[in-house]
Every structure is written in structure tokens, then in C-alpha cells.
């Protein structure tokens, strides 16, 4: 595998220099297109979507606090096709992030915390998906005027 | 990044906010995006569901404020941490101090705006 440049300068560096000089770690030339890096990049890119979606949410709440006129104007902005399209992409990103996170979460659990052991991986996953579904349904029903 | 860098000292707090942003923030955002940002603008809800008076009443209640803070603040920290790591993953680790510092500064400012937005409801 061809190497292009040194990897992170601190990668694998010992805290203090030892008597043996080791070769600096090198990145393979194909690192950007490896499947694992593409998956990391997709997961990382959701950060940009979350940033814009968060700013959008802050602006909506700010408009709500500014009175009925500002709130009505905001409703007009939210109804623009490009804004709706972005929010659909944001919703897909949120689903992607949670599904990936729920796959990682059980693997990141400690073997035990004091006397307690975490539940088996399938049980933990069911609990996470149930919490997501429950929170989404409850919040959606409340916001849509179903209750309260 | 050197061992004494401020970002390393803040790492436990940043990871806590990032983790809550992924889990709690994303779970809350799902319903928010679906109803407030997609179904309502498409006219698929009764007009009074998210009319000004009902939205104001929901948002200004104690539970409403807490939920709104979760929707507004936590995803910002998820975004900041993932943007930082996106740059690291794409080969810009040598600029991590600058990118991380900028990301978390923006996240802090947006969090302050979010808290003010919720408080003034």
C-alpha cells in the first residue's frame, strides 16, 4: 500500500523518547476512500446539518418570543420549499445518527458498574429504540395538538 | 495538541454535552423536525395546532422550556464535536486546536442565544 505523508505526528508516540528509534507512522494513499473513512465522514458531516437545524430551531423560538407578527413571518419562511427540503434532509440525518449511535452504544458499555451489569446487547437496543419511538410519538402528538 | 491544552481539560464536559446531543438531542429533534418543520409548513396540521397562542403556551410552560432547551442546546454540541472530528478525519489534525476552539466557541455562543430565546418566551 503506497504511503503519501506522515500520519498524525502524535500517533503512537511514546510519552518519553525511548532508546529505540521507531519509524514514523505513515498514512496509506487510499485512506480517504476507504469504506471506514467514508462512514466516519458521513457521520461527521451530520454535524453541519445539525448546526443549521439548531440555528433554525433557535430562530423559530426567538420569533415565537418576539410576538405574533414575527411568528407568522417565520411560518412563511418555514413553508418555503428549500427550507422544507433542508428539514427533510435534517430528519434523515437525525435518523442516520441515532441508528448508528444505537449500534455503537451497547458495545461501549462497561462490563459492570459496581454490582450492576448492563443488559444484553439486544435488550439494550430494544430499550433505545423504544425510548426514541416513545419520545417521538409523545412530542409529535403534543406539538400536533393531539393532547394538551 | 499538547497535554496541557484547554480543550483536553474540557474534554469530559465536551464529551458529556456531545453524548447528550446525540442521544437526547436527536430523540427530541425527531418530533420537532417532523411536526414543526415539515408537517406544519406543508399544511398537514390544523392551523390552531401550532398557532401563536398555543405555541406560546406550550413553549413557556416549565416542561416546555426544558424540552426546548434540550432541542436547542444539545444538538449544537453534537454539531460542534462532529464538525471538529470531521476535520480531523479529513486530515487536518494539525489544526485541531484552532478548529476545536472555533467549534466550541460557536457552540457556546449559540447555547447562550438558545437560553435567552427560551427565557424570553
Image (spheres, coloured by chain):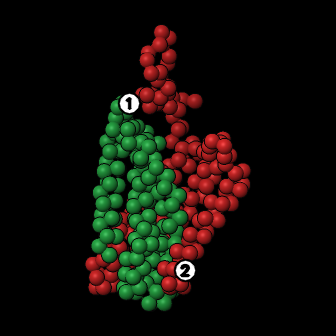
Chain colours: A red, B green
Where residue A98 appears, as percent x and y from the top left, is 57, 59
Q: Secondary structure at mark 1?
A: loop
Q: Which residue is mark 1?
A: B3
What chain does badge 2 belong to? Answer: A
- Left/right of residue B82 with respect to residue A121 in the rendered view: left
Residue extending furthest toward the top: A19
Q: Residue A141's mark? A: 2
Which residue occupies 60% across, 58% down? A99
The residues bearing labels 2 and 1 have C-alpha atoms spaced at a distance of: 48 Å
Q: Secondary structure at mark 2?
A: helix
Residue extending furthest toward the bottom: B47
Q: Residues within 10 Å of mark 2 (few under 14, many from 20)?
A: some
| Residue A114: quadrant of the picture | top right
Which residue occupies 44% across, 21% down? A15
Which residue occupies 37% across, 81% down? B56
Which residue occupies 72% across, 50% down? A120
Where residue A56 appears, as percent x and y from the top left, is 37, 69
What chain does badge 1 belong to? Answer: B
- Left/right of residue A3 with respect to residue A82 in the rendered view: right
Total numbered labels: 2
Q: In which quadrant will I find the N terminus of chain A?
A: top right
A1 over A56 or under it: above or below: above
Are the residues tagged 2 and 1 within 8 Å (C-beta)? Answer: no
Q: Nearer the viewer, residue B75 or A92?
A: B75
Q: Residues within 10 Å of mark 1 (few under 14, many from 20)?
A: few
- Asked if one can make out residue A63 in the rendered structure from this viewpoint, the answer is no
Where residue B77 appears, as percent x and y from the top left, is 41, 54
Where residue A141 appears, as percent x and y from the top left, is 55, 80
Amino acid at each position: 500500500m503506497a504511503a503519501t505523508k506522515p500520519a498524525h505526528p502524535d500517533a503512537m508516540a511514546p510519552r518519553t523518547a525511548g532508546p529505540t528509534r521507531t519509524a514514523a507512522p505513515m498514512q496509506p494513499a487510499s485512506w480517504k476512500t476507504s469504506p471506514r473513512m467514508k462512514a466516519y465522514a458521513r457521520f461527521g458531516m451530520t454535524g453541519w446539518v445539525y448546526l443549521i437545524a439548531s440555528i433554525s430551531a433557535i430562530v423559530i423560538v426567538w420569533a415565537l418570543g418576539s410576538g405574533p407578527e414575527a411568528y407568522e413571518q417565520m411560518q412563511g419562511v418555514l413553508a418555503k420549499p428549500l427550507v422544507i427540503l433542508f428539514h427533510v434532509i435534517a430528519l434523515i440525518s437525525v435518523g442516520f445518527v441515532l441508528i448508528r449511535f444505537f449500534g455503537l452504544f451497547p458495545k461501549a458499555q462497561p462490563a459492570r458498574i459496581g454490582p450492576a451489569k448492563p443488559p444484553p446487547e439486544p435488550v439494550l437496543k430494544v430499550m433505545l429504540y423504544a425510548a426514541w419511538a416513545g419520545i417521538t410519538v409523545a412530542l409529535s402528538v403534543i406539538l400536533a395538538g393531539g393532547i394538551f | 495538541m499538547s497535554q496541557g491544552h484547554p480543550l483536553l481539560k474540557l474534554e469530559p464536559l465536551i464529551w458529556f454535552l456531545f453524548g447528550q446531543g446525540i442521544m437526547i438531542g436527536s430523540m427530541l429533534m425527531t418530533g420537532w423536525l417532523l411536526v414543526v418543520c415539515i408537517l406544519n409548513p406543508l399544511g398537514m396540521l390544523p392551523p390552531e395546532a401550532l398557532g401563536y397562542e398555543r405555541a406560546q403556551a406550550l413553549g413557556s410552560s416549565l416542561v416546555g422550556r426544558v424540552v426546548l432547551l434540550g432541542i436547542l442546546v444539545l444538538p449544537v454540541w453534537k454539531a460542534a464535536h462532529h464538525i471538529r472530528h470531521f476535520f480531523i478525519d479529513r486530515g487536518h489534525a494539525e489544526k485541531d486546536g484552532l478548529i476545536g476552539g472555533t467549534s466550541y466557541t460557536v457552540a457556546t455562543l449559540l447555547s447562550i442565544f438558545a437560553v435567552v430565546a427560551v427565557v424570553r418566551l
